[in-house]
Amino acid sequence: MDARERELTENYSAFEQMLPGLMENSAGKFALLRQRQLVEVFDTAGAAHAAGRSRFDDRLFSVQKVRSDTVDLGFFSYAKYCRAT
């Protein structure tokens, strides 16, 4: 397992533990996670992803939608079109 896969797996596990608390005030929003920690919650997946890219040069972060039925999004950029600059 490489560093990116490990980060995704560990963040998802931590997110599942945080979920009950997040559902109270952040349902439907998007959580930015790094090193098993919640960094910030955003209104859109795009905003969470952009914040992760700007804050973490190594790109080791994940974005997860706060919802009662968890869905592992993996590294969000794989699911979102990103134009090369």
Image (spheres, rainbow, N blue to C red):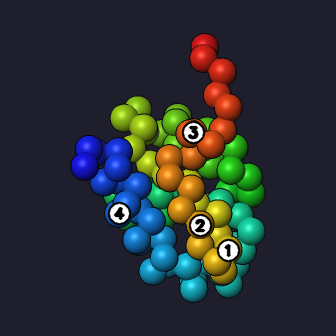
Label 4, residues with CA under 10 Å away: few <14, some 14-19, many ≥20: some
- Residue to which mark 3 is pinned: 77
Label 2, residues with CA under 10 Å away: few <14, some 14-19, many ≥20: few
What's the amino acid at mark 3?
Ser
Please tell me whether residue 30 is drawn above or below residue 14 in the rendered image.
Answer: above
Quarter of the image for residue 3 reads: top left
Distance Cα–Cα, label 4 vs label 1: 18 Å
Q: Residue at x 35, y 63 (%)?
A: 10
Question: Do residues under tags 2 and 1 come within 8 Å of each other at their CB atoms?
Answer: yes
Residue 10, numbered circle? 4
- Residue to which mark 2 is pinned: 71
> Which x, y percent locates residue 74?
50, 52
Distance Cα–Cα, label 2 vs label 1: 8 Å
Q: Is residue 75 visible?
A: yes
**Mark sitting earlier along the chain (2/4):** 4
Q: Which residue is drawn at 41% across and 32% down?
A: 57
Distance Cα–Cα, label 3 vs label 4: 18 Å
Between label 3 and label 2, give the one nearer the viewer: 2
Q: Which residue is drawn at 37% across and 60% down?
A: 9
What's the amino acid at mark 4?
Glu
Label 1, residues with CA under 10 Å away: few <14, some 14-19, many ≥20: some
Between label 2 and label 1, give the one nearer the viewer: 2
Q: Most extreme residue toward the top, as rendered?
A: 85
Question: What is the secondary structure assignment of the residue under circle 1?
Answer: loop
**Mark sitting earlier along the chain (4/1):** 4
**Mark sitting earlier along the chain (3/2):** 2
Please tell me whether residue 68 is drawn above or below residue 49 in the rendered image.
Answer: below
**Mark sitting earlier along the chain (3/4):** 4
> Which x, y percent locates residue 11?
41, 62
Quarter of the C terminus within the rendering: top right
- Residue to which mark 1 is pinned: 67
